[in-house]
């Protein structure tokens, strides 16, 4: 997104409002409420595309692996409902992507042991998860700006390919928070690192604003699955194959890069707005493009697939999706940080 000079005055107003709100929390004028469970927030200071969902998955898998009943609490962005919705009780998924939001529904289907609640009021959602669904720890998805809920660990993600340090504030650019807010972070996780990136330079930029622990991470494609059946194709077998790709995510170019790293030849790429609600017609257009160029695959992301869950997919459409995982390079130190939160509040 290129800055739009005409919108800079609105960005200054937005930034001033954000800074004032942060001061009110810093001065305790606005309270941060505690709940009876440790809270770990995963957030960012830019709008979309930093890899929050894979990091939340990584974190929840760590907690579940330690036999902690874990809840994910989020707003449920772009859902059709309002108020509190119980997406999963840790045993079964209770609703669909339209009512839960695509990210919450994706997490519910991928991690069946996690409790998942969406609510614009994060305090209310977290209390419901702890008091009614017996969660022992809460992961606050996209929680950095939602300061009404006190947290034990604040993790801020920065996309290494699109760092925020020279970005304009919304609505002229993608940055949603003032850079000085990084001082509140307990940890900064640099995400989507690729070979050749100046990681040390990024760390120096972070150090201008924060003394937080800095971690680095990268996304890895773990499987290439057929949407209709869930059948997983060997990754070596797709090298050199042609595909029509489509997605509606914050950083669509990163999806294309992931496909090309697998050796897939992307013949056509259709991008939609982030969280786009897909229709049957959208899928028909993509399928027609695949037939026209005779590509072996139609490929999308796991998050996009959640928004296709209510659409009938013909067996004749070779629709596949990528499953990705986030790997923190400093794994031992990262796990020790997470475990320290549990030892402080859970045990």
Image: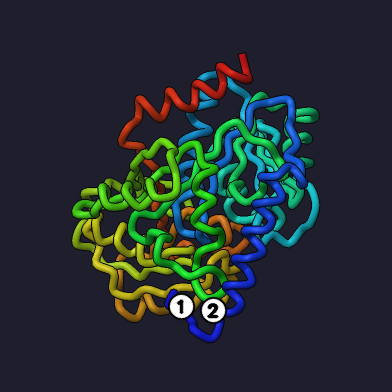
Q: Which residue is mark 2?
A: 8
- Please say whether residue 96 is visible from this viewpoint: no
Q: Is residue 234 above or below residue 320?
A: above
At horizontal 44% and vertical 44% (from top left) the residue drawn is 210
Q: Which residue is mark 1?
A: 3
Q: Is residue 110 above or below residue 258?
A: above
Q: Depth check: 193 or 236 in front? A: 193
Q: Residues within 10 Å of mark 1 (few under 14, many from 20)?
A: some
Quarter placement of the C terminus: top right
Provide residue 202's location: percent of width, then percent of height. 32, 52
Q: Secondary structure at mark 2?
A: helix
Q: Residue 137's image quarter?
A: top right
Horizontal side of residue 276 vs 338, given as left or right:
right
Provide residue 43's location: percent of width, then percent of height. 54, 48
Q: Residue furthest top?
A: 347
At horizontal 27% and vertical 46% (from top left) the residue drawn is 234
Disc number placed over residue 181 in the picture, else none: none
Q: Secondary structure at mark 1?
A: loop
């Amino acid at each position: 997104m290129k800055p739009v000079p005409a919108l800079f005055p609105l960005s200054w107003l937005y930034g001033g409002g954000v800074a004032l709100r942060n001061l009110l929390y810093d001065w305790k004028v606005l309270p941060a409420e505690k709940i009876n469970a440790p809270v770990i927030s995963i957030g960012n200071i830019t709008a979309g595309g930093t890899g929050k969902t894979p990091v939340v998955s990584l974190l929840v898998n760590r907690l579940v692996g330690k036999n902690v009943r874990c809840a994910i609490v989020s707003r449920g962005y772009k859902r059709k409902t309002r108020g509190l919705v119980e997406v999963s009780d840790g045993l079964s998924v209770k609703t669909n992507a339209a009512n839960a939001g695509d990210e919450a529904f994706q997490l519910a289907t991928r991690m069946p042991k996690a409790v998942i609640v969406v609510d614009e009021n994060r305090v209310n959602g977290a209390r419901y998860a702890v008091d009614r669904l017996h969660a022992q720890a809460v992961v606050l998805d996209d929680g950095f700006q939602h300061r009404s809920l006190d947290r034990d660990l604040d993790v801020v993600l920065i996309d290494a390919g699109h760092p925020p340090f020279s970005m304009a504030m919304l609505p002229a650019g993608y940055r949603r928070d003032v850079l000085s807010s990084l001082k509140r972070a307990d940890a900064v996780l640099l995400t989507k690192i690729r070979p050749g990136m100046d990681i040390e330079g990024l760390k120096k930029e972070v150090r201008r604003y924060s003394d937080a622990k800095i971690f680095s991470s990268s996304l890895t494609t773990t499987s290439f699955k057929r949407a209709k059946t869930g059948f997983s194709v060997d990754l070596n077998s797709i090298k050199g194959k042609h595909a029509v790709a489509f997605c509606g995510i914050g950083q669509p170019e990163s999806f294309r890069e992931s496909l090309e790293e697998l050796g897939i030849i992307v013949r056509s790429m259709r991008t939609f707005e982030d969280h786009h609600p897909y229709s049957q017609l959208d899928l028909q257009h993509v399928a027609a493009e695949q037939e026209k160029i005779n590509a072996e695959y139609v490929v999308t992301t796991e998050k996009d697939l959640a928004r296709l869950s209510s659409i009938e997919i013909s067996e004749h459409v070779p629709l596949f999706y990528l499953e990705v995982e986030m790997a923190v390079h400093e794994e031992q130190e990262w796990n020790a940080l997470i475990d320290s939160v549990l030892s402080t509040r859970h045990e």
